[in-house]
Amino acid sequence: MTKTHYFGLKVLFYVSVAAACPAASAQQQEQFRLVHDTFTVVSLQMNDLGPFDFILDTGTDTTLVDPRLASLLSLAPLDRMTLTTPVGKQVLVRSSLRRVALGSAAVSDVEVLVEDMPELRKLDPHLRGILGQNFLSHFNYALDYRRRLLHLESQNELRDSTIGKRVPLEATGSRMVIQAEMPSLGIAKAHLLLDSGSSDLVLFRKMEQLSPSQLGGNSSLVNSRSDSLEVAMLRIHSLTIGDQHFHDIKLALLSPGAGESRPEDGLLPTILFRALYVNNREGFVIFNPRFDIREPKAGN
């Protein structure tokens, strides 16, 4: 299984692994920073060491660590996995972390893949890996891009104070997929992976699958090449997700063959929204919610 993961138009790949068991945690909020005004970076404790900077990625199944951090944490290899991707094969070490903690939110026995990720170092030399869904799917949370805050709930305190249209999550394993409409491309129902690690809206569709009438007058096309993949950059007139409507939005259309094995039709970057609330327990997301999350009082 592969994942096309956009750092601009850089490509990164992932595999599905088993989930872990979450430890009890209290409601909390964590400050995050954005790299390139797109990628959410949080600080983690791993095996009680850290903090380490990781990209929070709702679109990646597993958690990835770079080899230097794996060495620092003395991670023992469990086995090796061969990944086949559009740009070749890669053998990665699979290991396990005894504990991963984001503030007081913790998960035990987290499986990880060890991978050298030079694209991360180009983004920010402090980045040590990618925090994936085998951690995030255990929690309900609100991702607030305006205030750069990640709010994690312990019970239903966020759900009960959040107002907005609930968009169902079509969960496949730990992946979060939602339905969207692209009327300017004649697409009534597209299944998009909710992805905080993507900078652009992405469609896994061959150019010849879009008729001239769908392209003509509704979009502009610029061809480019990145990581040995042909990418067509479009601008489409409209995109609808739940009660959210976007106009004149950029879309990356992958070259033929790049997304043939994908169960989803594309990627929906969370950075398109001011904020979102993800409820993994009940399987829905609210985009641009209206919610009243109180700042903690000094001394608490």
Image (cartoon, rainbow, N blue to C red):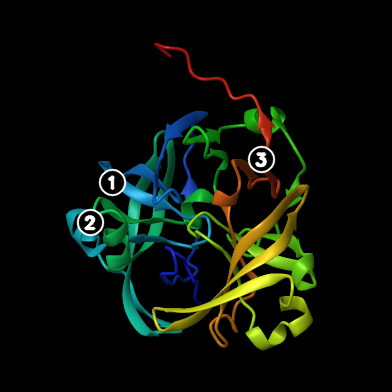
Measured as percent of width and height from the top left, residue 162 is found at 69, 32
- Residue at horizontal 49 percent and vertical 32 percent from the top: 147
Total marks in image: 3
Quarter assignment of residue 143 = top right
Front one among 118 and 250 = 250
How far apart in space, not on screen, are marks 1 and 2 (Cα)?
A: 9 Å
Residue 117 visible to an observer of this rendering: no
Measured as percent of width and height from the top left, residue 185 is found at 75, 72
What is the number of the mark on residue 288?
3
Q: Please indicate whether residue 88 sits to the left or right of residue 293 in the image.
A: left
The answer to whether mark 1 and mark 2 are in CB contact below 8 A is yes
Kind of residue indicated by mark 3: Asn
Kind of residue indicated by mark 2: Leu
Residue 134 against residue 15 in the figure, above or below: above
- Tag nearer the camera, 2 or 3: 3
Measured as percent of width and height from the top left, residue 158 is found at 63, 31
Kind of residue indicated by mark 1: Phe
Mark 3 Cα within 10 Å, few/some/many (few <14, many 20+)? some
The answer to whether mark 2 and mark 3 are in CB contact below 8 A is no
Mark 2 Cα within 10 Å, few/some/many (few <14, many 20+)? some
Front one among 185 and 262 = 185
Q: Which type of secondary structure does the marked residue at label 1 adopt? A: strand
What is the number of the mark on residue 69?
2
Pointer 1 residue: 52
